[in-house]
Amino acid sequence: MNSSKPAQINNTIERQVAICADDFGVDQAVNDAIVDLAAQGRLSATSVLVDGAAVQSANELLGPLALDIGLHLNLTDAIGQLKAADVKPLTRLILKSHARQLNHQWVRAAIERQFDRFEGLFGKPPDYVDGHLHVHQLPIIRDMLMDVLSRRYLGPKIWLRDTRSPPGLKQSWSWSDRFKPWLIGHLGMSVLVKQAQARGWQTNQGFAGVYDFTHKHPAYDDMLKRWCAHRKTGSLIMTHPAKQSVAGDPIGQSRVDEYQVLGSESFGKYLLDEKIRVSRLSQVFSTLP
């Protein structure tokens, strides 16, 4: 086992930041937005829901693009052919995981099946792993994930998503705007990062993109630029774009708003002016000593 810790990332004048689109495969409108934005150079990663109803063409659509392609580990949503009995509601999952009452066999089987499915779709391991609704960091789930990754992929340079927000946001966001990002980053991430480092796996250096879809919030263009202003090389910004709102999707309009802002001429100009290069973290990490 490689026990060396990942090297520290040094900022340069040009910052190399990953922008990741979650939920590839959940719907064709999401897929179309991700492919379009990746072709424009506005995305450098996408997280795939391997059980999504629109995932069959994933390799054909994503393979030619300059993207890190990750497994978006899902234990909460009955998408595609999954039934309600195959998953658990998020609140129940969080409570049972922290109470150490999750069935280990159920968790391991769900993780193994999704890695098998990913390899079946792409013919290779994922470039990285994260969690739908950030479940990958929860107790028991993170332990099973580390066991599965160690057995299957200890050699390949897989990276994992760190959901913790950087301290700089305290100066630019209200308490209410910071609460959800704070909560997500404190569900068990620090332990997962230590587990990953002990195995020589990298994690992103700073995270943003979390906001409350259900309450009033600043315009997405404003939030995105403020997130970018606090990012350093190796950071990750999470997005959820779609070309159109899908019936029954609680964040449908937010997805459309994100797509329009990410693909806008003004955001492209902002990236150039701020010397931010949208970069694949797998390549950023590979250049480190």
Image: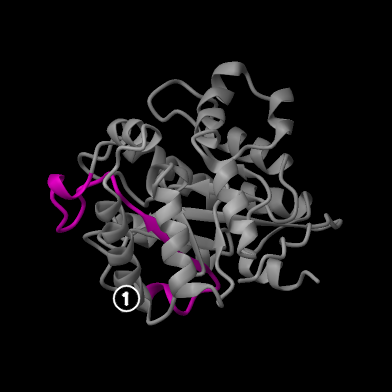
State yes or no: residue 67 in magenta. yes
Closer-to-camera residue (197/161): 197
- Report the span colored magenta: 61-87
| Type of the residue with mark 1 | Leu
Q: Is residue 7 placed above or below 264 in the rendered structure?
A: below
Q: Is 186 positioned to the left or the right of 74 in the image?
A: right
Residue 261 position, x and y percent, is: 53, 45
Q: Mark 1 points at which residue?
A: 121
The residue positioned farthest toward the top in the image shown? 175
Q: Residues within 10 Å of mark 1 (few under 14, many from 20)?
A: some
Q: Is residue 257 placed above or below 173 in the rendered structure?
A: below
Q: Which residue is located at x 55 percent, y 68 percent? A: 158
The residue positioned farthest toward the bottom in the image shown? 123
Q: Is residue 119 placed above or below 264 in the rendered structure?
A: below
State yes or no: residue 5 in magenta. no
Q: Which residue is located at x 70 percent, y 73 percent? A: 286
Closer-to-camera residue (192/49): 192
Residue 276 position, x and y percent, is: 73, 55
Q: Is residue 69 placed above or below 168 in the rendered structure?
A: below
Q: Which residue is located at x 30 percent, y 44 percent? A: 245
Closer-to-camera residue (163/254): 163
Q: Can residue 114 be spotted in the picture?
A: yes
Can you say which quadrant of the picture contains the N terminus? Answer: bottom right
Q: Which residue is located at x 60 percent, y 64 percent? A: 199
Determine whether the residue tagged by mark 1 lies in a helix, strand or loop: helix
